[in-house]
Image (cartoon, rainbow, N blue to C red):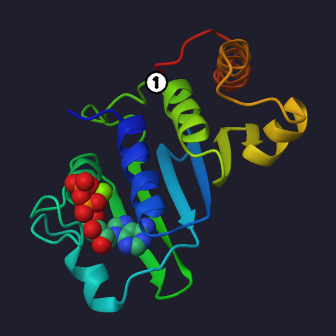
Amino acid sequence: MREISLHILDLVQNSIEAGATAVKLEIIETIVKDSMVIRVYDNGRGMNKKMRQLVIDPFITTRTTRRIGLGLPLMDMSTKRCGGYLKIDSTPGQGTVIEAMYQHSHFDRPPMGNLVETIKSILVGNPVLEFSYKHTVDDKSISISSREIADILDGISLTQPDVLIWLHGYLSDNIANLYGGANDENN
Ligand SMILES: Nc1ncnc2c1ncn2[C@@H]1O[C@H](COP(=O)(O)OP(=O)(O)OP(=O)(O)O)[C@@H](O)[C@H]1O
Ligand SMILES: [Mg+2]
């Protein structure tokens, strides 16, 4: 079973492969509504209607290194197993929004996994990407963007070891706060 943070990494990777220069990740968890919604918005090349219908099928890919694409079909199956869905909204030439929904309390819902490492690797691995991340858990919410981080760092590179340690702490603290402050990245 693939953790949700790894599915998120797949989605962001797809956006980057589609030429996106800006990617927004939104995670909305509500206990009352018993739902976890994940949205990834990008300004990449988009998909036409036929492509949107076909990409849930694992045999469809525009990648040339392997004949089948797995990212979207795997996440689609994972959401459906958990009372949810995966929806693709896209305009060719403008961008794409992927929305995935899980029943929060579903027995088979994969754990979030290590969101801190996921966000960190997106930021560090794509220094020129305009990335933003907003995460809501009931009435608590955080938002972090590559632009804000660049402002805090004021020209210092994200790849410097001491900066990486700072970034890890910054993300861990913010995310832990969402879950009541307990230092648990695997909620
Ligand atoms: N955000 C996006 N914008 C434009 N096209 C996309 C986007 N996400 C997916 N696609 C298209 O859908 C195809 C299937 O995506 P999927 O993630 O399932 O497989 P893949 O990326 O091709 O391969 P894998 O994820 O297994 O490495 C991609 O090859 C791409 O053509
Ligand atoms: Mg993919």
Residue 94 visible here: yes
In this rendering, position of residue 140 left or right of residue 25: right
Give the vertical position of 82 relative to 21 (above or below): above
Q: Is residue 95 above or below residue 28?
A: below
- Number of other residues with Cα within 10 Å of mark 1, as a class: few under 14, some 14 to 19, many 20 or more: some
Residue sitting nearer the eye, 75 or 164: 164
**Above or below, comparing residue 22 to residue 183 in the picture:** below
Q: Amino acid at mark 1?
A: Asn
Instruction: Count every numbered label the image shows and give the total.
Output: 1
Q: Pick the residue in front: 63 or 53.
A: 63
Q: Is residue 44 above or below residue 47?
A: above
Mark 1: which secondary structure? loop
Percent across and percent down for residue 38 are: 50, 51
Rendered image quadrant of residue 177? top right
Q: Quadrant of the N terminus?
A: top left
- Which residue is denoted by mark 1 in the rendering? 114
Front in this rendered view, residue 61 or 2: 61
* Residue 4 x, y percent position in the rendering: 38, 38
Residue at disc 1, CB closer than 8 Å to ligand 1? no
Give x and y (percent) for residue 179: 63, 22
Residue at the spot 48% in from the left edge and 21% down from the top edge: 187
- At horizontal 13% and vertical 63% (from top left) the residue drawn is 58
- For the question of whether residue 76 can be seen, the reply is no
Q: Position of residue 69 (x, y in %)?
A: 18, 61
Give the image quadrant in which the ligand numbered 2 is located: bottom left
- Which residue is rendered at x = 75% and y = 42% of the image? 143
* Residue at 86% over, 36% down: 155
In this image, 13 relative to 159: left or right?
left
